[in-house]
Amino acid sequence: MQYQRQYYREKYYNHHEKVVNDETLAKDKRHEKISGVCAGLARHYSYPRWGIRLAAIFALFTFPMITLIAYIVAAIILPNR
């Protein structure tokens, strides 16, 4: 019983901490919608993919040229995973 409580406590705290991965930033081709940039950012920074995509859409409506240029540059520069 003690081990079970410790396991659930560790699982809860590890799940809720935002930890930056040691991997290099790369596009995620497995979960891509357009080119995998948002999925790669979400994987690298341990955020949900839908949150990053929603922020990208919001940024696209708020700052269209800057966001579009940044997305295209990231799609070209970032390596595939």
Image (spheres, grey):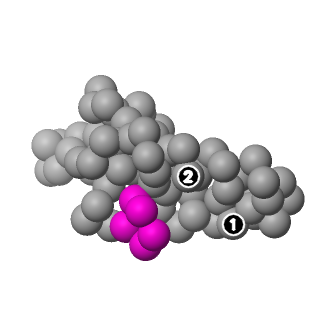
* Above-or-below relation of 58 to 75: below
Q: Position of residue 10 (x, y in %)?
A: 29, 40
- Please report whichever mark, 1 or 2, sits nearer to the chain's N-terminal start: 1
Instruction: List x then y, in percent, for residue 61.
Output: 81, 66
Query: Label 2 sits on what residue type?
Result: Ile
Q: In the figure, 66 relative to 35: above or below?
A: above
Question: Measured from the top left, where is residue 73 in percent x and y?
Answer: 54, 44
SS majority, magenta = loop
Determine if the magenta segment contains residue 17. Answer: no
Identified at 23% across, 41% down, the residue is: 6
State which mark lies toward you, 1 or 2.
2
Foreground residue among 36 and 17: 36
Residue at the image point whose x is 67% and y is 56% from the top: 68
Choose between 64 and 52: the one closer to the eye: 64
- Residue named by callout 1: 57
Mark 2 lies on residue: 72
Task: Write down the region rendered in magenta.
Answer: 32-36
For residue 42, say whether it is visible.
Answer: no
In whole angstroms, how far apart are the C-alphas of marks 1 and 2?
A: 14 Å
> In this image, 47 relative to 36: left or right?
right
Q: Residue at x 37, y 67 (%)?
A: 32
68 lies above or below 76: below
Residue 34 lies within the magenta run: yes
Q: Is residue 43 left or right of residue 57?
A: left
Residue type, mark 1 in image: Ile
What mark, if any, has residue 16 been given in the picture? Answer: none
